[in-house]
Structures are given as C-alpha cells and as structure tokens.
Amino acid sequence: MTGDDRQAGASRLGPGWIAAIAGVVLLGLALRIAGFSLFDLRYADEFMQYLEQANRLATGQGIRPWEWRLGLRNALIPQALAGPFALGHALAPGTLLGLELARAAFLALACLALPAAWALGAQSGRAHALVALFVVAVWWESVLYANLILSESLAVTLLLLAAGPVLADRPSRKALVLAGLLAGLGVLVRFQYGLFAAVLVAGALRLDRARWTAFLTGAVLAALLGALSDLAVGLTPFGWIWTNLTMNVGQDRASQFGTAPPLEYVIQLGRHFWPLFPIVLAAAYGAGTRYRPLFWAATANVAAHSLIAHKEYRFIWVSVLAWLVLAAIGSVHAAERWRARRGEGLSPLVLALLIAGWATASAFAAKANGGVIAQRVGAAVPLLANRALADPQVCALAMAYEDRAHLVPALLVRPVPILLAPGSVVPLPADLAEGANALLLAKAPGDPRYVRQECAPFADGQVCLWRRPGPCAPAPRRTYQAMLEANGL
C-alpha cells in the first residue's frame, strides 16, 4: 500500500471511526480543561516572561526582567497573548478576564498538537493515526505542558504540525509552504529547537529542489513575521539571538541557574518514563523509515542539549513528544506484524487493547512522578493577593523576595504596587512596613499593626495574608522592578 493509499484510507472514515476520534479528542480536551489553572505554575518563565510581558504590551505597565531589559527574547508569545489581555481589560475592567482569555488562547494553540499527531499517524493508516492521537491526548506530560505558558509548549506544537507535510509522500506545494511557515515560527518561538528542525527537514526533503523551494518560501514568510514582531517592540530584527548567545553561552549566565552532567537527560528520561523509556524509544524507532528524520531530529536535540551545562527537562520536550508520537505509530506496526503472523488483521479488540495499554503506561508514569497536579504549585500567593485586593483600602502588597516568581502584576485583579522584602523578612524593614498595608508572608512580620487574616498551603508550608489599617507610603527601593535590578535579575 502506498502512502497516498494509506492517507486516503485514513480520510475515509465511517461512523464508528468518527465516534472514536471524537471520543479521544473530547477526552484530551477534558483532561486539559481539568488541569487549567490561572495561578499555578511550574516554571517562573510562565508568569514573568510571557503573561507579564503580554499584559505589559496590552496596558503599557508591568515588570521588565533582565532578559527583556537586555533584549534576549523576542516578543512573539507576548504579542500573541496581548490581544486577549487587551480584550479582557476592555470588556471587564477590574476583573481577571484578560488573564483568563490569554491562558485559554494559549491552551487552544497547544491543543493543535492533537491534529498534528493524527496527521503524522495517518501517513501509515487510520489505526496508527488513532493511537497517535490518543497518546498525545492522554499522556500525562502532554496534558501538563498544554497548560504551561512556555515557548517549548508552543514550539513543539508548531514543529509537529510542520512535520506532517514534510514527511508526506506527495505533499502539495501549499502544504509545504505552510510547513515552512510553521517550522519557521516554531524556531523563532524557541530558537534552540533549530537543530531539531534542521535535521527533520534535511532528512525528509533531501535533494528535492521543488520541495525545498516551497518549504523555504514559507520559512521566509516566518522570518518576515519575526522581523516585524521585533520591530514592533523596538528590537533589531533577530538581534535577540546574538544577545542570547552572548549572554548565555559567551558569558555562561545560564549556568547561574544550575548545571548538570552530560547524562542528566538520560537519567531524567528514565525517571519520567520509568520503567518504560527503553520500550518507548524502541517503539519510536520501529515506526519505520518514513519517520526516521523525525526520530533522528528528536535524538539530535537531546544530544545537543546534553552538551549544554544548564539543563531543564522542558528543553527536550520536543524530543519527548516526537518520540511518543512515533512510539504510538510503532506500537501499531508491531501489533500488525504480530497479527499477520497469525494470518489475521488488526481487529478492533486488539486496537482497543493497544490503546488501553498506552493509557495504563501513562497512568503508571504519572503515578511514578507525582502526576500532573503535583508538577504545578503556587496558586496560594495570587489567590490571597486578590482576596486582599477585594478591599479597596488595600493600596500595595508586599511579599518575600524568594516568592516573587509566584506573583506578577498580570495576575492581579487591579493594579497596585508589589513590594519585595529582602531575604530576611523579620523584622519587617520600616519603609516596607509603611509602603504596603497587605503582606503575603509565612511568618508574623513582627509589626503589631499587622493582623493575620487567613493562610493557605504553599510549598512545604504555608503563606498568610496580613493586614494593617492606614495608607501606603512610597517605597521606591522596595518595588518589584527596583529589587530585580538590584539583584541583577
């Protein structure tokens, strides 16, 4: 059967297949909606680098960390989310509607990984497409990353969408132009995934000049959009790439946030998939030669990131999800070969058992790693902050400097100054005590004017809301922005 025959078979779907696809998609959406949270986070970048910058573009006010002051990042994600923020502020000022719309918009973009998985699997057949769709829909980390506002989450979706046309037998010129556009945007969103894209595209297109021409047309369009994005926020087009390399590689600034040995990702993959990673990798390779460029792109990305001292699991998320899609396809191939040796085809029962096996594997891996909920923390801080702001007499908030990642102005129902206390909070510095009449601290501030109102679980302990009567005096040295700059952040 040719690739065209396989894709045609995947597109001719009866009522049973349509019901199965709809059920899987609805399950995937339900899991992602269940994991939706306005205030929980896993990485500080979610709030500071993306939501806060989007709100700043929409309102003209906000915090600028060192990456934005020095021009290390482009503004594609904040620009995409600024519209929802602006719409929310216009429709319902004094509410969190802008934040809700921005998070919902990003989740909708991340959900495009589902059709990307179907399209990749459909190149082998509809059973392969259904299992690939199911794995991306329910795998616990796929659900987790869909709700994380990260460049990795969006870039993975864009690159997998691009992989379908690139790997197809006879893609149309329009499909390849779109693939080039998507791949280009994916690399702009997360330029560290450039090697992944290069290996994938070079391995798939090889020396086919016509395909390269169409793909590069789309990539040039992506570059133009990237240049316009940079110009819109006052950046030299693509200058942020050089600045990023200069700061994080030349000056090794990234290593300040932690380093790990070269085999760290192998250890992490073993832990995140325990004890399934060798099986997943073997199944991914077993997807077949058609998908080999995607397999080697994922492998090259992990290998390259292993050479960089600063390591975070999210940096290889594109490899993990690509391997999962390929493993899903490879598992169907394996089931087909097993049934063929018995002189039988792939029955609905075997397909259902295969899907059940993947669901069990995801549940097992999730339990071994604590599950989706355990991977995100911190909602207590913004929840208490907004409860305080329900009182119009609250004119400024103060919190411990080390908890700053959990609260930025974009998360507040109304704008008030956020002050940061130094490392030693107690006794509370005089200017900070006068500068804020609401505190978010774990311990009593040592000022009798402050009364504890309520507490909530936070990290390994709790955080409490403390209130005092009276106004707020200016405390310029304690503002969020001033404290970041004083600490070089």
Image: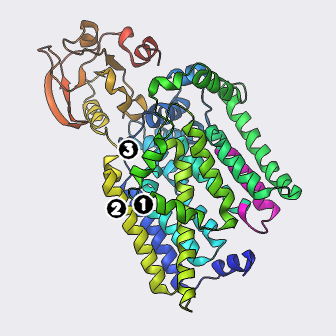
- Residue 339 lies, in percent from the top left, at 53, 86
How would you classify the magenta stretch by its main secondary structure? Answer: helix
The residue sitting at 56% across, 50% down in the picture is 318
Q: Quadrant of the N terminus?
A: bottom right
Marks 3 and 1 sit apart, C-alpha to C-alpha, by 32 Å
Amino acid type, label 2:
Phe
Which residue is identified by label 2?
A: 364
Question: Where is 406 relative to 36, above or below?
Answer: above
Q: From the top left corner, tell me how far across and down residue 11 is, in percent.
A: 65, 78
> Does residue 112 show up?
no
Q: Amino acid at mark 3?
A: Leu
Residue pointed to by mark 1: 276
In this rendering, would 218 be left or right of 457? right
Could you give the CA–CA distance between mark 2 and mark 1, rounded to whole angstroms?
9 Å
**Does label 2 or label 1 sit earlier along the sequence?**
1
Residue drawn at 65 percent across, 68 percent down: 288
User: Which of the two residues, 436 or 172, is positioned nearer the viewer here?
Assistant: 172
Indicate the amino acid at tag 1. Answer: Leu
Residue 239 visible, this angle: yes
* Residue to which mark 3 is pinned: 38
Nearest to viewer (mark 2 / mark 1): 1
What residue is drawn where x is 24% and y is 23%? 438
Residue bounds of the magenta highlight? 167-186
Point out the frontmost of discs 3 and 1.
1
Q: Residues within 10 Å of mark 2 (few under 14, many from 20)?
A: some
Whether tag 2 and tag 1 are in contact, CB under 8 A, the answer is yes
Mark closer to the observer (2, 3): 2
Whichever of callouts 3 and 1 sits on the residue coming sooner in the sequence is 3
